[in-house]
Image (tube, grey):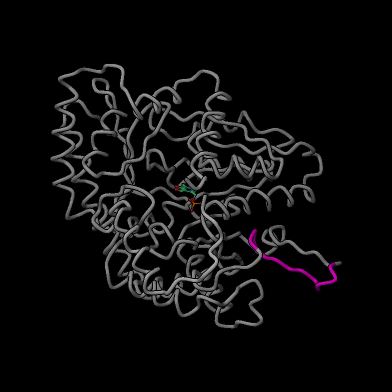
Amino acid sequence: MIKFPEQGMASGELLRQMGDLERQDADWKGGKTWALVYYAEDELYRLAKEAYGMFFSENALNPMAFPSLKKFENEVIAMTADLFRGGPEAAGNMTSGGTESILLAVKASRDWAREKRPEAKEPEMILPITAHPAFEKAGHYFGVKPIHIPVGPDFRAEVDQVRRAVNKNTVLIAGSAVCYPYGVIDPITEMAAIAKENGICFHTDACLGGFMLPFLKKLGYPIRDFDLSVPGVTSISADVHKYGYGPKGSSTIIYKNSELRKHQFYIYADWPGGIYASPTMLGTRPGGAIASAWAVLKHLGENGYLRLAEEAMKVSRTLMDGIAAIPALRVMGKPEMPVFAFDSDTVNIFELGEVMGGKGWFLDRQQLPPALHLIVTPNHSRIAEPFLQDLRQATAELAKKGKSDASGMAAIYGMIGTLPDRNAARRIVVDFLDDLFKEK
Ligand SMILES: Cc1ncc(COP(=O)(O)O)c(C=O)c1O
């Protein structure tokens, strides 16, 4: 058992130990990870780190003390609102990530409905099954019941089902641009129109696509509308720490107007410690993330994002074509940006994930149905070919064996994914997490 250190350790020795540990982590800079890290290029990376370091200690809980942070946050929101055609009324905040942005959107919609739709006594929100679990988490925390809508063969939400699911308790409809599992945009225009007709809120989750889709559209890709200019869209979330290439802990939540945003704020006026006013979920808000996000957006500008969007699309095309050319594998649906999944009828896809893992590639596993998932960034350009080579070889080896029962982790993924009792699946994962967060 680790004990609280009695004596402090010299910084040099500590940093050496940390460096040793870091070298054992997934090699994201070498392009080996296909999720979790969005890395574009070294100059940008160094700027982001330096800007973070400069504002490392500042706290955006009370921006009156730090006008610099107030400026950075307001400008990040203004620039992003402009990107999403929000108009002069748009109002938002920076948050610690996509999950916090979505939690706030759900909370604000619920509280808005308490005032404007008192008949919604048991609040519900309508979500495509592909919506990010952050909505489920929000529903769990804030008592808003998720109503799940199926997606069609193109993996986009079925609009008719959305219409049918609306009732007096509905406070929010949400759609993704793009959804994480398949990289496609839900029919936001049609879904938001239903929200508008019924006088309820609509949230576009552009956490993943927000800093990619507007640039792809400018480059001439056929991107359907998803932003604040779509009638009925009342809020949108977009993560600077994904395709914005900003530091971890930077996201945005933007509402159509400040009247909606007011339902996001939390105020406690009766505390002896003073009037407590908190704009988002967190108390202390790290100044570093806000300052660094501002620096990254200003440094890249539209021309920088256009260049990076084109690069990511190019390498994603190479990867999708390379995967589609492997007879046993199939790219799922028609991804609209450099995020996609692939599956197989003839090899065990989780076993393929394990074999690729053995070769140092870190791929996310999906379920319902089983698939492997890739988030592609410009950094993957130089490793696309070695990756495809490993994938071809691994698939050919497994194809010889056929789609047999897998063993090890592949079997565990398969088992959890297919357990008919989802509560049992949840219990297995709770125990797994409990074990994971223990010092051993
Ligand atoms: C579409 C979408 N929404 C929300 C999130 C949640 O973002 P975060 O992990 O920053 O909380 C993600 C994360 O991948 C996402 O892809």
Name the chief secondary structure element in magenta.
loop
Looking at the image, residue 159 lies above or below residue 385: above
Q: Quadrant of residue 332?
A: top left
Looking at the image, residue 302 lies above or below residue 115: below
Question: Which residue sits at x=73%, y=39%?
Answer: 123
Q: Position of residue 146 (x, y in %)?
A: 63, 35
Question: Which residue sits at x=16%, y=26%?
Answer: 327
Q: Is residue 273 magenta?
A: yes
Q: Nearer the viewer, residue 307 or 392?
A: 392
Q: Position of residue 41 (x, y in %)?
A: 27, 66
Q: Position of residue 440 (x, y in %)?
A: 47, 45
Question: Which residue sits at x=43%, y=65%?
Answer: 247
Q: Nearer the viewer, residue 23 or 122?
A: 23
Q: Is residue 431 magenta?
A: no
Is residue 108 among the parts visible in the rendering? yes
Residues rendered magenta in the picture: 271-282
Q: Position of residue 30 (x, y in %)?
A: 23, 56
How many labels, in total?
Answer: 0
Is residue 229 among the parts visible in the rendering? no
Q: Quadrant of residue 377?
A: bottom left
Left or right, residue 126 beside residue 179: right
Q: Nearer the viewer, residue 275 or 231?
A: 275
Q: Nearer the viewer, residue 171 or 16?
A: 16
Looking at the image, residue 365 lies above or below residue 402: below
Question: Which residue sits at x=41%, y=65%?
Answer: 246
Left or right, residue 429 beside residue 397: right
